[in-house]
Image (cartoon, rainbow, N blue to C red):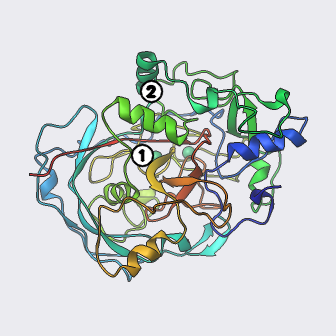
Amino acid sequence: MNAQKKEPYVEKPVAGFPLKLVIGLMVLSAAFVLLLAAYTQSSQSLPSTPSSSSEKPTPITQESTDNLPVTPATSAGSGFAPTVANPVPATASAPEGMVWIPGGEFSMGGDAESESLCSVPGVTRDALPIHRVVVDGFWMDATEVTNEQYSQFVNATGYVTVAEQKPTQEEFPTAPPENLIAGSTVFAPTPQPVPLNNYFHWWSYVAGADWRNPTGPENDLTGRENYPVVQIAYEDAVAYATWADKRLPTEAEWEFAARGGKAGELYAWGNELQPGGKFQANIYQGEFPVEGRDTGEDGFKGIAPVKQYSPNAYGVYDIAGNVWEWTSDWYRHDYYESLAAEGRVARNPQGPDSPFDPAEPTEKKRVHRGGSFLCTDLYCTRYMVGTRGKGEVRTASNHVGFRCVKSVKQP
Ligand SMILES: [Ca+2]
Ligand SMILES: [Ca+2]
């Protein structure tokens, strides 16, 4: 009855839990508990310790960004060439909470092999080939958008997110009315180890889960003002960005920012997962996805407040890990191939004209980037900077959020 029931395509839905699938399964499931896609860790597991990171370098400023070093490729990448950042400084003082990303020409994509990329050895094919891209400079939120920030938007506008809306009979014509209940997808750790080839084991549809109640009605945002907002569908992120006079980043802008002026490195902070033995992002350690097995060795079990780890060279925090981030590009598995086939440097690419994921051909997906607190070297190392994720646009979950960018007029 749906594409997710078959053996997943190599690059499975990283964070996409089509709501249609959810409601559709509800028709069959009186238990009202659905097991859905992805690799994550329950945000019911609150951070057990404060950040282990005491180093918080000063975010890059307008004055300093044009002096950022250009570093030649040092790792994986035979296909990588140095990043050439624009010398043009920002034209105005930084908007509150944003940092200047100079833009320039860089090598985009990923060719690093990993035995743990979503249980599939080798490279993530949708991140190939490595190709040259130019993006103009822009402002970027230094952090993922927080609950506090999203609250300000909702208080000002009365906006109602997708997860808060009761699904309609028109949208789900075969679902009985009693199943048309607002809710969203929530990571549900398993009581015992499970095969990692079926993400249905660790996702549930939870009635009443939404951005105010990320894991369900029993958990609200008290004390979580500085955590990234989650349970945000694509249109919910766009609505916020529009209200804030910002926009979502393109996938190319996101990767340019994440690479921090470096070229071909495995991570947003370099080539070692734990330089000096220290984790640089909130990901997942321990046996996935088993209840109680997230060891929190990186300082956090589950989701973390923003800004708990050092920023990258451009001053952006949590660009890897914590929560996945929506970008404005449609997802196509072969988009990089089509760009490379044009035989020239892509300038400010906006993504393909339409979405297509061979694993779920009927779903409309946008690109997610950065991985989340549920990404583990045992299962899905999508915190590696060149790798890609994707999500159905009307589907939210408790490990997907976003950050915004803002264009400037070029002199
Ligand atoms: Ca963690
Ligand atoms: Ca992130």
Measuring from the top left, give residue 247's x and y in whole percent: 35, 41
The residue under label 2 is 150
- The residue at 62%/36% (across/down) is 43
Q: Is residue 7 above or below residue 295?
A: below
Q: Secondary structure at mark 2?
A: helix
Pointer 1: what residue?
318
Q: Is residue 27 left or right of residue 213?
A: right
The residue lying toward the viewer, choosing from 12 and 307, is 12
Residue at horizontal 80%, vertical 60%? 195
Instruction: State the image quarter where residue 77 is shown.
Output: bottom left
* Distance from the alpha carbon under mark 1 to that under mark 2: 18 Å
In-front residue for pair 176/326: 176
Q: Residue at x 29, y 65 (%)?
A: 262
Q: Between residues 251 and 39, which one lies in front from this camera angle?
A: 251
Secondary structure under tag 1 reads loop
Q: Is mark 1 within 8 Å of ligand 2?
A: yes
Locate residue 241 relative to residue 49 in the image: left or right: left
Quadrant hosting residue 271: bottom left
Determine crowd level at label 1: few under 14, some 14-19, many 20+ residues with C-alpha closer than 10 A. many
Look at label 1 and name its amino acid: Asp
